Amino acid sequence: MDFGKSIPAQDIALISPTVELIARKNLHPALPDLLLSAAMDIQGAGLLW
């Protein structure tokens, strides 16, 4: 597959599955918020609807 040769003339909306972040019970309570913040920083606004 070559995405470089298959660029549509206009933007299109794509549908993708949602993602769940999971953690172990023994994870420090402060870490889930930090991990979620990092995921949002990496994914940008695409993570939020």
Image (cartoon, rainbow, N blue to C red):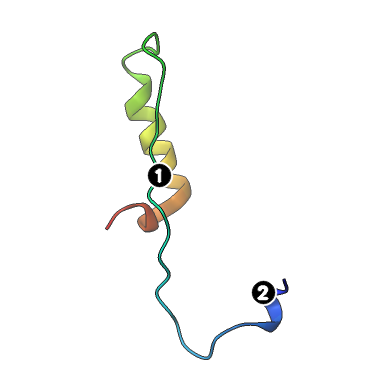
Q: Residues within 10 Å of mark 1 (few under 14, many from 20)?
A: few
Of the 4 image quadrants, the one containing the C terminus is bottom left
Q: Mark 2 packing: few (<14 Cα in 10 Å), some, or many (20+)? A: few
Image height of 32 relative to 11, above or below = above
Residue at position x 38%, y 29% in the image: 34
User: Between 9 and 17, which is closer to the camera in this rendering?
Assistant: 17
Residue 23 coordinates in the image, percent (x, y): 41, 22
State the CA–CA distance, disc 2 to disc 1. Answer: 24 Å
Asked if the residue under mark 1 is in contact with the one under mark 2, i.e. CB atoms within 8 Å, the reply is no
Q: Can you tell which quarter of the image residue 15 is in?
A: bottom left
Kindly identify the residue that appears in the image at 39 percent across and 8 percent down: 26
Q: Which residue is mark 1?
A: 19
Q: What residue lies at 38% left-to-right and 58% top-to-bottom?
A: 46
Q: Is residue 6 left or right of residue 8?
A: right
Element at label 1: loop
Does 35 sit left or right of 9 as displayed?
left
The quadrant of the image that shows the N terminus is bottom right
Above or below, 49 relative to 34: below
Kindly identify the amino acid type of the residue bearing the numbered disc 1: Val
* Residue underneath mark 2: 3
Q: Which residue lies most toward the left here?
A: 49
Q: Quadrant of residue 38?
A: top left
